[in-house]
Image: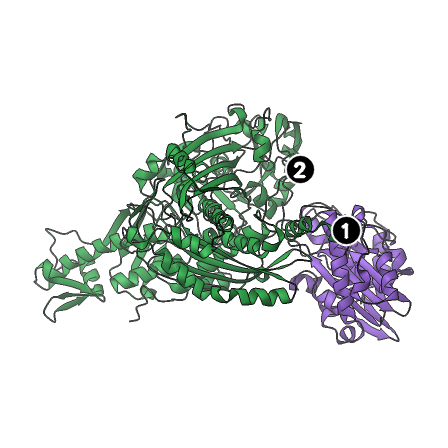
Chain colours: A green, B purple
Amino acid sequence: MVVDGIGASVKRKEDLRFLSGRGNYVDDMNRPGQAYAQFLRSDQPHGKINKVDISAALKMPGVVAIFTGDDFAAVGGVPCGWQIHSKDGSPMVEPRHPVLAAGKVRHVGDPIAMVVAETKQQAKDAAEAIVLDIETLPAVAGLTAALAQGAPLVHDEAPGNVCFDWHIGDKAAVEAGFAKAHKIVRLDLINNRLVPNAMEPRAAIGDYDVSSGEYTLYTTSQNPHVIRLLMGAFVLSIPEHKLRVVAPDVGGGFGSKIFHYAEEAALTWAAGKLQRPIKWTADRTEAFITDAHGRDHISTAELALDAEGHFMALKVNTQANMGAYLSTFAPSVPTYLSATLLAGVYKTPAIYAEVKAVFTNTVPVDAYRGAGRPEATFLVERIVDVAAREMNMDKVEIRKKNFIPKEAFPYQTPIALQYDSGDYMATFDGCLKAADYAGFEARRRASAAKGKLRGIGISTYVEACGIAPSAVAGALGARAGLYEVANIRVHPTGSVTVFTGAHSHGQGHETTFAQLVSEQLGVAHDMIDIVHGDTGKVPFGMGTYGSRSLSVGGSAMVKAMDKIIAKGKKIAAHLMEADVHDIEFKDGKFSVMGTDKAKTFGEIALTAYVPHNYPIEELEPGLEETAFYDPKNFTYPGGCHIAEVEIDPDTGTVSMLNFTAVDDIGRVINPMIVEGQIQGGVAQGIGQALLEHAIYDESGQLLSGSMMDYTMPRADDIPNISVGTEVTLCTHNPLGSKGVGEVGAIGSPPAVINAVVDALRDYGVRHVDMPATPAKIWAMIEAYQPKMAAE
Amino acid sequence: MYDFTYAKPATIADAARALTGDAEAKALAGGMTFIPVLKQRLNKPSAIIDLSALGLAGIKLEGDKLVIGAMTTHGAVAASAEVKKAIPALAELAGNIGDRQVRYRGTIGGSLANNDPSACYPAAVLALGATIKTNERSIAADDYFQGMFTTALNPNEIITEVHFPVPQNAAYTKFANPASRYAMVGVFVAKTAGGVRVAITGAGQNGVFRHAGFEAALAKSFTPDALNGIATPADEMNADIHGSAAYRAHLVGVMAKRAVAAAM
């Protein structure tokens, strides 16, 4: 028997079907008698709907039905799952988000009508035949415009377009720190808006079984149970036992598939009305204008330092773009997922942050890989670099001087979080060595000899993930618990099916989780199946985001397997006529300590299901256990990323030469999958730093609305990424794992921008906003040397 | 995509007839621009006349001219031993258009008929002083390009071949748009028997153009430094989210110097 447990680079079990075209995605699925939906969407950023005339469209060939906003007046709006309170204690402004636009359209892409027809083509044809009378209203797209005096209102109930005005931290302590400061460094930063662009666009099928009265929604989701909860309880009033949500193979999410989207509710509701399955698959254009975007913050940061370069206080003011409606987790992103991370890896004693969330006539903005933590990390690691320069200190020295020392854990930050473990000096020194930081000046000179500007950039970061302790999340505004669930079913012959509430959309769970089972129960991989993504099979779950699947979902599996082993010991004690306290379980065998008596895991499983010789008075037959695991704290992965870039001063082009990451993600289950996760996250971080930007014009039209203008990173944009790990264990979950899904995207952007600014050190450049495009860099170089234009 | 009828004629005469008889009919070459346009329902042709069975693909050297059939794919041009020998810059240009999939479908004739202002081939055709052969006539490159997406072609005229005079030296340098990887600025420099010709694609508001200032300077001295101090007027350049007109004007100079260095 081969056991590939914790620490083995087991090849991904799921890849055979993905790489050979045998994946089962929503668009691969078809239901008998299925019709097709097409959404007619607003091409205007803001407008008053005077009339939606469907009369001609209804007569088009193949049309089954056409629904508009009026049809959804009686159902609930698309809910928001997190409530923030403003400084004055008032709850955030939470305008109704109708399933189909009612009264007004508020962003390009807002759905106005849903056409259901026999074929996709017929649905598209009929959608074009709908006659719209929409009166254009003035729109606001950017944060500054939305907050300007007299700006047009996105929602009448949100004066000044403000959703909430929140704060955290000790303002008085910060002011005291500033009063005593030797120097105050100030920096204005923009965290650029991004389009998630998962490879698979969103898709859904609504289905209704007349005989059972049961609805089924097949959807591209990272968390089917959450969709069932939000859609069933808040939008359509369908009780859980009559609503099944299936999220089969899903081709990437990066956060954008966490949220409950209006299309899911529209399709499910219409399937009931029409008593037919209805399918919809977004095209890439729809993805650009309907999938929740990421980031889009404007911040001002001020760091107070003493004469030796110790950080004394940090003050941050952030404006966060929410888009036109509140998406599922949007309010949590700039607040509890971002501002609470402003301590970073430093012992800054006083921190105060204010966050104003703002409505605009743009696509809703919500969690995108890292969700708030990349924004905080970018801010902290940029201002630390600026402070080092303005204090004439070395950027390595200023970090080491301010690190939270490893002896200080558990460490209570001044803004809510308590870091459980870490060793920032270890990851930093490891990364400096791996990146040959000491040899950089020689490399810089070699580049200079070729006329190129070389720069090196450091980011030392910590993040909070593995969300979340339910009570803490609830106190902070979450409207759900954030535990995870595992059901372990041991079959009579000893094979194992794991039903997990986590969801795999590229993460490799079918392999990693099988390794956990193999390690703990001693069962071979080909005897283990991981089942996820179906509320009809998995008892419950909160899904996959916030790097939580292993630390929370995996911990639930460990707890469930503990129960399996405990029950197995009782069965083994009975069979071997020993005291249960004398039974030990190891390497797949139950044995009586100090003897050679033993029963295999398979023998115990068979006995549980064929209980002829069985303690039937004290123990139920069967071998299946469920555990709900609610984490005691967040987990705190951290580490160091170092980027090395070369700039061509003639064109402004930034070339990524090397990228080195040394991360502490706690216990590693599958090093190969971990390396892939970090490389993927870093690739997205490089994308944010150098390439990607969702740009709206002033009127609210998305200018970078296709791959022709939105720069997704390609393979040749990404350098070799060297990945290393230094391990301190998470102290509060049974695996000691911290999570790896987001660290790459969190740690990397400031490393890249710090490298770009370093490369431009001779050009008077203090800061570069992302993305550092060639045009932007050239303009900075040009501004420094205005006479050389005609060269 | 909207419904249309599809025909794949076997002769140029049949293809021309099909296009002439139906004002809404459109010719299909490689389809690398046209098919995405159809899929987005931005064009509604009555009929599509597929030119792939007309025998228009092929590469041959005829005396001092390189003749490339209109339906020859970018991939075939990039891989051709004849092209690499006669005009290596042209093979390199073709080898950097789009991605591998595009290069195996996209054609030189399709690119020239479309005349996208950011396409690479127009720069080569104009700088090399090529001749566009059609089913009706021959058109000199200087007469062919008439602004973005506009050419001298009559509505139903079919490009059959492109005749490239073999230059003494030539090179193409492209500064790619970071997102689309089309030319944000592409400069083709050619030193020919008839003088130095420099064509710029991607940058100008009216599509591909010749740079008279660069040509005059390079005629005196075919060196990168000859271009020092010669301005490209920014007010004739494109501006968009990827770069200002001033940036493009600057890049024209940078890319031209690099092209000259590569051609020397």
Kind of residue at badge 1: Ala
Q: Secondary structure at mark 1?
A: strand
Give the position of the C terminus of chain B as an image quadrant.
bottom right
Q: Is residue A4 left or right of residue A135?
A: left
Q: Which mark is residue B47?
A: 1
Residue shown at 77% from the left, 48% from the top = B46
Callouts 2 and 1 in the same chain: no
Number of residue marks = 2
Numbered disc 2: secondary structure: helix
Q: Position of residue A483 (x, y in %)?
A: 32, 44
- Residue at 72% from the left image edge and 72% from the top image edge: B79
On residue A128, the disc is 2
In space, the residues marked 2 and 1 are separated at their CA atoms by 21 Å
* Residue A204 locus on image (x, y percent): 50, 44
Give A485 or A697, whichever is nearer the viewer: A697
Which mark is on residue A645?
none
Query: Is residue B80 among what the camera can see?
Result: yes
Indicate whether A422 appears above or below A232.
below
The chain to which mark 1 is attached is: B
**The one of A394 and A265 positioned closer to us in this rendering:** A394
How packed mark 2 is, by other alpha carbons closer than 10 Å (few <14, some 14-19, many 20 or more), is few
Coordinates of residue A73 in the picture (x, y in percent) = 50, 26
Q: Label 2 amino acid?
A: Glu
Mark 2 chain: A
Q: Which x, y percent locates residue A549? A: 37, 51
The one nearer the camera, B221 or A90, is B221
Q: Residues within 10 Å of mark 1 (few under 14, many from 20)?
A: many
Is residue A673 in view from this perspective? Answer: no
Q: Choose mark 2 or mark 1, whichever is in front.
A: 2
Do tag 2 and tag 1 residues touch (Cβ < 8 Å)? no
* Of B85 and A340, the residue lying toward us: A340
